[in-house]
Amino acid sequence: MARKKNDEAVPAIPRTATRLGKSSVLKGTLRFRDSVRVCGRIEGQIISEGFLYVEDGAEIHADIRVGSTVVAGVVHGNIHASDSLEMLPTGKIYGNVKAAKLRIADGVVFEGKCEMIKNANTVDIFSAPVDQLKSSVQRV
């Protein structure tokens, strides 16, 4: 993570493969592999294993299912990020979120529920049944 002059954290953003400009309006399903930076408006759904960046000023009315996402704009819909979700200070999310890693900056507007995704390879030793613990230890 880089730093601005005023020591504010700047998210590490992967090189964007595709950019939807400010005047872009997409209605339907957006599917992509690498990364997309949205500066305009999307209505429908977004599905990808890749990275989604919602620019400040962008507006999305869609359910989002991606690998990772950074939200600096407005999202009306549920977000499922299998890896990470970062909400920047200008971000507004009106919907439920589900993510493996979550970072929320000061100033974010978030109205919804949050659920953390557990790693399928881990076992909670304090609440798992004994048989599950035994089989987990034997696999190692």
Image: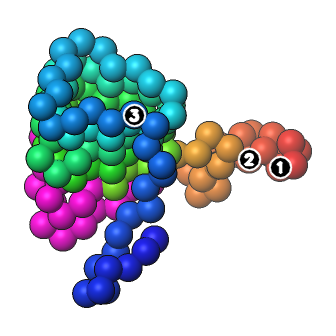
Mark seen at residue 42: none
72 or 19, nearer to the observer: 19
In the rendered view of the protein, which quadrant contains the N terminus?
bottom left
Which quadrant of the structure image shows residue 10? bottom left
Residue numbers of the magenta segment? 87-111
Residue at mark 3 to residue at mark 2: CA–CA distance: 45 Å
Which amino acid type corresponds to the residue marked 3 in the rendered image?
Thr
Q: Is residue 122 left or right of residue 139?
A: left
Relative to residue 86, is residue 51 drawn left or right?
Answer: right
In the image, what residue type sits under mark 1? Val
x and y, in percent, of residue 102 in the image: 38, 56
In magenta stretch: residue 107: yes
Report which residue position mark 2 lands on. Answer: 133
Question: Per the image, is 71 magenta?
Answer: no
Q: Secondary structure at mark 2?
A: helix
Residue holding disc 1: 137
Q: Is residue 100 above or below residue 105?
A: above
Distance from disc 3 to disc 1, alpha carbons, whole Å, reads: 44 Å
Indicate which disc, 3 or 2, sits on the residue closer to the N terminus.
Answer: 3
